[in-house]
């Protein structure tokens, strides 16, 4: 039985008469998370997690929203729907649907490392699993969050010694909140761009405990920022808004920073490979934990991941969607670099891929929106330029 059909409006459940993360307006939408490529305006009714609702209200404006807790069941035409932690950003959820003993899980975007803020990813047993593949290449292998945070703090300390402001480029919804706990220990004050501020205040008003931040205002003197930390979306890079912080160092927080040359392409002083998506190993572990007999692979490196799964005896197929990767700062140069890496990956032999995985297993056993200070864009809150280009 096919509980999901792949249509020109999005992922459709005909039995329940609803869509999951539709990219066209529909009567009923079930939303995995509040990033713009997954949550678009115009639908009649939205079902989402409790912490996603205020973010959707910020981004989409007045709509009909129904909010539920993780694990809470909702029935539509006999189809049982429940949301479960995805670990991607605050409120992000996997969608479990069940009908006549058939279970499908649509993961949305997810990461398997618990960041202490977004909810720990919960593997859900199912017959069919839809997975993202944003970083679906073996080259993507994340360091532990604690190690990356330590590197970020050391970089801030070095900038302070040189009298510089540390500006972190991070998506306003997800990454910006995640790095606050790290940066609040590294500087007296954390200043934020208006887009980051809007999301921050929305989450605080919803009851999320976050370290305090100060919004950057036009009349603030330049000396105020020296030695401090600023968080801004990727659209602020190379803008007039950034010049008020000179002398400054620019650090980009994005999984793309693991690709050789991307820091240079972004004209950044530092790159931190901190992603809100699962790396190669995380994708494989998550897929395996579902016990799924079939896997559909969506946005990202679909060809590589689906081919690998088939080689390992798991039925897999690619699915083309209109989802993007707006929260990782995926500008064209970054996408081009990633494409180069994929081409390199495709050139490897099957034996080479297997050898790389075997070596990783053996080792385990032995031990990047908003334009410069635009009032209109700040009102948009969570939309940073090309948007889910964080998702990277």
Image: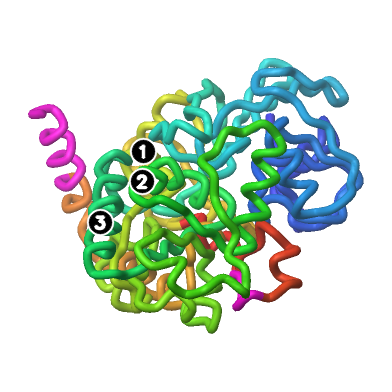
Residue 216 point in image, percent of width and height? 58, 65
Pointer 1 local density, CA inside 10 Å: few below 14, some 14–19, many at least 20: many
Identify the image quadrant of residue 354: top left
Badge 3 crowding class, 10 Å Cα cut-off, few under 14, some 14 to 19, many 20 or more, is some
Kindly identify which numbered label has been placed on residue 107: none
The residues bearing labels 2 and 1 have C-alpha atoms spaced at a distance of 5 Å
Residue 267 position, x and y percent, is 34, 78
Q: Image point 68% across, 75% down: which residue?
A: 374
> Where residue 317 sits in the image (x, y, percent)?
51, 47
| Local SS, label 1 | helix
Locate the N terminus by quadrant.
top right
Secondary structure, mark 2, is loop
Left or right side of 219 for 187:
left
- Whether residue 158 sits left or right of residue 223 in the image: it is left
Residue at point 75% right, 50% down? 22
Residue at which label 1 appears: 282
Separation of marks 3 and 1 at Cα, in angstroms: 31 Å
Mark 3 / mark 2, whichever is N-terminal: 3
Residue shown at the point (32%, 70%) measured from the top left:
164
Name the residue that disc number 3 marks. Answer: 157
If you read the primary sequence from the N terminus, does the residue marked by circle 3 or circle 1 appear first? 3
Q: Is residue 57 above or below residue 332?
A: above
Number of other residues with Cα within 10 Å of mark 2, as a class: few under 14, some 14 to 19, many 20 or more: many
The residue under the point 85% across, 26% down is 76
Q: Secondary structure at mark 3?
A: helix
- The nearer-to-camera label among 3 and 1 is 3
Asked whether 356 falls inside the magenta stretch, the response is yes
């Amino acid at each position: 039985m096919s509980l999901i059909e792949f249509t020109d409006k999005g992922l459709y459940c005909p039995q329940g008469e609803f869509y999951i993360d539709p990219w066209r307006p529909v009567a009923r939408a079930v939303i995995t998370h509040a990033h713009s490529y997954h949550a678009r305006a115009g639908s009649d009714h939205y079902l989402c997690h409790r912490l996603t609702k205020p973010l959707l209200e910020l981004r989409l404006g007045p709509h009909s929203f129904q909010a539920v807790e993780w694990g809470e069941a909702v029935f539509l035409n006999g189809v049982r729907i429940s949301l479960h932690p995805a670990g991607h950003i605050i409120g992000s959820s996997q969608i479990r649907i069940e009908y006549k003993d058939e279970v499908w899980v649509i993961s949305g975007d997810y990461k398997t490392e618990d960041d202490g803020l977004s909810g720990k990813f919960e593997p859900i047993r199912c017959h069919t699993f839809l997975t993202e593949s944003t970083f679906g290449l073996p080259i993507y292998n994340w360091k532990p969050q604690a190690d990356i945070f330590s590197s970020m703090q050391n970089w801030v300390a070095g900038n302070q010694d040189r009298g510089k402001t540390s500006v972190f480029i991070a998506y306003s919804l997800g990454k910006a909140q995640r790095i606050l706990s790290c940066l609040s220990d590294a500087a007296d004050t954390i200043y934020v761009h208006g887009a980051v501020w809007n999301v921050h205040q929305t989450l605080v008003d919803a009851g999320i405990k976050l370290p305090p931040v100060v919004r950057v205002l036009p009349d603030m003197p330049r000396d105020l920022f020296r030695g401090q930390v600023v968080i801004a979306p990727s659209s602020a890079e190379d803008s007039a808004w950034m010049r008020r912080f000179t002398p400054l160092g620019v650090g980009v927080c994005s999984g793309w920073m693991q690709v050789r040359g991307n820091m240079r392409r972004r004209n950044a002083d530092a790159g931190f490979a901190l992603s809100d998506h699962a790396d190669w190993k995380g994708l494989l572990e998550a897929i395996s934990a579902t016990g799924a007999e079939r896997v559909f692979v969506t946005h990202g490196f679909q060809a590589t991941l689906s081919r690998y799964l088939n080689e390992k005896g798991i039925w897999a197929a690619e699915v083309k969607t209109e989802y993007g990767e707006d929260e990782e700062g995926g500008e064209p140069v970054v996408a081009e670099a990633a494409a180069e890496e994929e081409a390199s990956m495709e050139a490897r032999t099957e034996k080479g891929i297997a050898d790389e995985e075997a070596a990783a297993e053996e080792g385990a056993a032995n031990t990047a929106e908003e334009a410069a200070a635009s009032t209109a864009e700040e009102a948009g809150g969570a939309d940073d330029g090309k948007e889910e280009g964080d998702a990277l």
